[in-house]
Amino acid sequence: MKTIVVLTGAGMSAESGIRTFRDHNGLWHNYRVEDVATPEAWERNPELVLDFYNERRKQVVEANPNAGHKALVQLEKRYRVKIITQNVDDLHERAGSSQVYHLHGEIRKSRSTKDPGLIFPIEGWELKWGDRCPLGSQLRPHIVWFGEAVPAFEGATQIVKEADVLIIIGTSLSVYPAASLLYYADASIPKYYIDPQATPVNDVRNLKVIQKKAGEGVPLLMEELLGE
Ligand code: OAD
């Protein structure tokens, strides 16, 4: 069975009603990264950080997977499909994809500030100041903030190396190290980049650019790959 590796970003969930970061009206046009998504922001004003992620989490809880997420599940009929996502939502899992690797954490989970190995599901959408782990320390969102290490990156590079086909969906490829993952794929394998703003990527061979939204482009590519 061939392995398809899929790298997804915020555009994957845009049609589910979750805002992207850098598009017109993206989150980073309304919030400063330094205020809500860094360890320094957490030190300075943890309640503001908690509020920011509570609002994001509420939207995720209320959102549903779109046609793009569902099409990736269909690919499992014929391929081993491994999804590496920069997204912190759980829409791939809720659509039914069986192998999902989160590079930037998971918004519906909290983590101990004393022991990063202690990770808990969050019931509902709210994580509050005063919510503590069993060791007694404040719980923080299980999110990789700017300036923090990306522990899942090493494992993700191994997955990309195994790919027979690589599909990139809905990402501006502007955040590293996530954006460097495509360079770990074998140069000769077919690669697809589905994003309304997609352009050819320097030094990446065999890349077919599909300038469509995920909800349209992924089902079309799925039909093509299942038909082969
Ligand atoms: P960006 O906001 O940088 O890019 C979103 C991409 O989605 C753009 O290339 C859009 O053209 C595309 N897009 C918009 N609507 C789409 C649709 N319906 N279908 C397909 N594509 C669409 O988001 P990311 O590249 O995911 O990190 O950003 C990477 C990281 O930056 C995020 O994981 C987050 C952020 O800061 C952290 O919070 C750690």
Image (cartoon, rainbow, N blue to C red):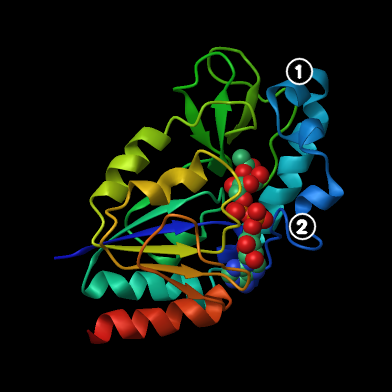
User: In the rendered structure, which amino acid carries the disc numbered 1?
Assistant: Glu
Secondary structure at badge 2 equals loop
User: In the rendered structure, which amino acid carries the disc numbered 2?
Assistant: Gly
Name the image quarter holding residue 107: top right
- Relative horizontal placement of residue 64, taking residue 1 as reference (left or right): right
Q: On the image, numbered disc 2 is attached to which residue?
A: 26
- The image's mark for residue 142 is none
- The image's mark for residue 43 is 1
Check if mark 2's residue and mark 1's residue have beta carbons within 8 Å: no
Ligand 1 shows up in the quarter that is: bottom right
Count of numbered circles on the image: 2
Rendered-image quadrant of the C terminus: bottom left
Q: Does the residue labelled 1 lie within 8 Å of ligand 1?
A: no
Name the image quarter holding residue 192: bottom left
Which of the two labelled residues, at mark 2 and mark 1, occupies the earlier sequence position?
2
Q: Position of residue 95 (x, y in %)?
A: 44, 67
Q: Is mark 2 within 8 Å of ligand 1?
A: yes
Secondary structure at badge 1 equals helix
Is the residue marked by circle 1 packed among few (<14), some (14-19), or many (20+) residues within 10 Å?
few
